[in-house]
Image (tube, rainbow, N blue to C red):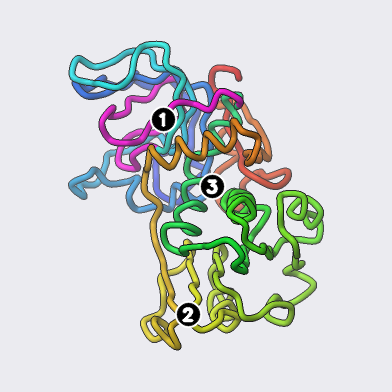
Amino acid sequence: MFALRAYAPSEPARLAFEEAPSPDLGQRDVLVRVHASGVSPGELDWPGVWLDRDATPRVPPIIPGREVAGVVEAVGPQATGFAVGDEVFGYLDVHRDGADAEYVAVRADAGELAPKPESLAYPEAAAVPLSSLTAWQALFDHGDLQPGQRVLVHGGAGGVGTFAVQFARWRGAFVVATSSERDRAFVSELGAEEVIDYRGARFEDAVSDLDLVLDTVGGDTWSRSWDVIRPGGRLVSIAVPRPPDRDDEDGRRAIWFVVRPDVPQLVEIGRLMDAGLVRPIVSEVLPLARGAEAYGPGALRSGPGKVVLSVAGG
């Protein structure tokens, strides 16, 4: 098969599109014919992708790509719940080779794959799993967002932010988001009642007394966000761990988490998409052969949302 293979951590220049061995199909695995994969530009920096589940360093090259949309091609003898021909999407184990390839092997019982939403083409479905689960878990599992509450989403035009704005609005919250001036109208259209140009204004001058802030940015955005939360409010970050001296101050809570695969949540998100209540945002669709352009700090991104690699057409 052909695949995008990484030869060193944090070095997108050493990504190569080349022939690679097809994955071995384990007893409990399903083999997915990949139609599209979603890109997280910083994945090569993630320590976990370079380690096996027992923390043993993996021998390069490895295949990145944590988000998959495709069709089940084969089923291992002890795999249950899937059949050849099933259309699936999901968030894949970081400790195994990923979906930037023509085929990927996935544990059937690991809670990573769900039925693909019927209304989505494969590139759209590949933009969903990681970003949507991150937004869902941040707002609802960790942020306990309730109807009528006020939430600030940093990076409202990003992969996670676009889902967070839509989910929060669907839940009935009052949504404020930060974005560039270029993306202001787009983020408003997603459901944000107020959009703050982070280059032209300081958000703490525009909002206060918030129930929840979702930090996707890090840096001083975290400390500045802490000061706009009401007593009893929550600051949920996917960018930086919480400082030890800022937790449980005046009832405020600082939370940092790492997203986990969750099939029931993916099914619910897919239901919202099929109902037309939420939509994925695809910034760019590149052929797998150009996949290296989508990784690293200088990654290609022509607009809001997520870059997707097309592997077997749409």
Residue drawn 56% across the image and 51% down it: 160
Looking at the picture, does residue 266 appear above or below residue 229?
above
- Based on the picture, tell me whether residue 96 belongs to the magenta stretch: yes
> Where does the image place residue 239, in percent across and percent down from the top left?
49, 64
Looking at the picture, does residue 192 appear above or below residue 8?
below
Q: Which of disc 3 and disc 2 is earlier in sequence?
A: 3
Residue drawn 52% across the image and 21% down it: 35
Report crowding for label 2: few under 14, some 14 to 19, many 20 or more residues within 10 A (C-alpha): some
- Whether residues under marks 2 and 1 lie with C-beta atoms below 8 angstroms apart, the answer is no
Report crowding for label 1: few under 14, some 14 to 19, many 20 or more residues within 10 A (C-alpha): many
Q: Which of disc 1 and disc 2 is earlier in sequence?
A: 1
Amino acid found under the numbered disc labelled 2: Gly
Q: Kindly indicate the quadrant of the structure image that contains residue 112.
A: top left
Say if residue 235 shows up in the picture: yes
Q: Is residue 124 left or right of residue 140?
A: right
CA distance for labels 3 and 1:
24 Å
Which of the two marks, 3 or 1, is nearer to us in this view? 1
Looking at the picture, does residue 266 appear above or below residue 121?
below
> Where does the image place residue 213, in percent across and percent down from the top left?
56, 69
Which SS does the magenta portion mostly show?
Answer: loop
Q: Which residue is mark 3?
A: 41
CA distance for labels 2 and 1:
36 Å
